[in-house]
Image (cartoon, helix red, strand yellow):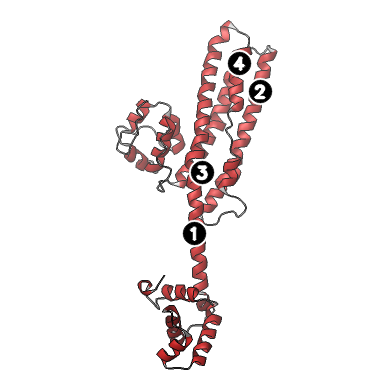
Amino acid sequence: MKNLKIYEANDKMITLIKDNYNLLQSLGSFGINLGFGDKTVSETCKMNDVDTCTFLAVVNFTINGYSDFEDDEQLDVPTLVHYLEASHTYYLDFQLPFIRRELEESTDANDRLGRLILKFYDEYAHEIRRHMKYEEKTLFPYVYSLLDGQPVSDYSIETFSKHHESADQKLRELKLMIIKYLPANAHLNNKLTATLYDIYNNEEWLKLHAQVEDSIFVPAIRRLERQVRQNDVTKNISTMVLKGVENNETLSDREKDVIIGVVQGMQNKEIADHLCISVNTVITHRRNIARKLQIHSPAGLTIYAIVNGLVDISSVKL
């Protein structure tokens, strides 16, 4: 079995490129400019405002499938989104038109089969453009809403994941059609061979692009969704325990004493004896507390008491 080389933050960036020239396109998608000299990966990323951990996760995965980062919460979602958006721009604005021109130049304009292959390519280009534009119009805005803490309620990363399919099937078919059926033409043969080579490279690029989305991006968004949901729960609890304050109905000192008694597990009579008041007075205080705070359970009063410093959490039996 081949030993995998795992690149780290202290490796020189030029070493990565010398070992894997196809990383040049990834640099552009991350927004990393050339001319980094002998700087390390960490230094180069910092110089270009790129998260080093996320860069290395994508690089090590695309080079050799290394995926030990799946449980690593240090991956930076904005960096991932920027990488995917820039990758789409590269493919839609450069690679698709480039391959189209190559096909035109390497086929006979008078050959009917050649024209059919161009038509087939145009259908492929339309499909891949639709595939990527969906992500740009639906998926990426959803992720940005998560980052803002205000996710769209009727969408989730599972919706995307369940319907996410690789878009390179037609490219594979195109490649095989050219090899098997396009008539030989001596003066165009070299151009056609070069075009096929570029199609093979694009097929591999698309496969890796889809794998990065499935293996890195989707798990990262799942974690972000859980975090946002947890934040919503915390916010709702804070709203609940502070509702009385928002209504400008502050508790009296005696009502706070009653809450402390409830939190400590005392019954109404025990609270009455402890505070030297009647049981009916304790009941009246508890009714007023519930009205002011809109909290009716001992558990809710315990949360309120902890948040507002009436009791120390270490003294509460959980």
Question: Marks 3 and 1: in contact by CB < 8 Å?
Answer: no
| Cα distance between the residues tagged 3 and 4 | 35 Å
The residue tagged 2 is 120
Q: Give the amino acid type for the residue marked by disc 1 in the picture.
A: Gln
Find numbered disc 2 in the image and state the secondary structure of the residue it sits on.
helix
The residue tagged 4 is 178
Q: Who is closer to the viewer here, 117 or 290?
A: 290
Q: Quadrant of residue 264?
A: bottom left
The residue tagged 3 is 218
Question: Which disc number belongs to residue 230?
Answer: 1
Q: Position of residue 131 (x, y in %)?
A: 61, 36
| Cα distance between the residues tagged 4 and 2 | 11 Å
Q: Residue at x 55, y 57 (%)?
A: 150
Quadrant for the N terminus in the image = top left
Disc 4 versus disc 1: nearer the observer: 1
> Around disc 1, counting alpha carbons within 10 Å, would you say few (fewer than 14), some (14 to 19), or many (20 or more)?
few
Vertical side of 164 occupied by 231: above or below: below
Instruction: Give the mark nearer the N terminus: 3 vs 4.
Output: 4
Q: Give the amino acid type for the residue marked by disc 3 in the picture.
A: Val
| Cα distance between the residues tagged 1 and 2 | 48 Å
Q: Give the amino acid type for the residue marked by disc 2 in the picture.
A: Phe
Q: Who is closer to the viewer here, 214 or 50?
A: 214
Find numbered disc 4 in the image and state the secondary structure of the residue it sits on.
helix
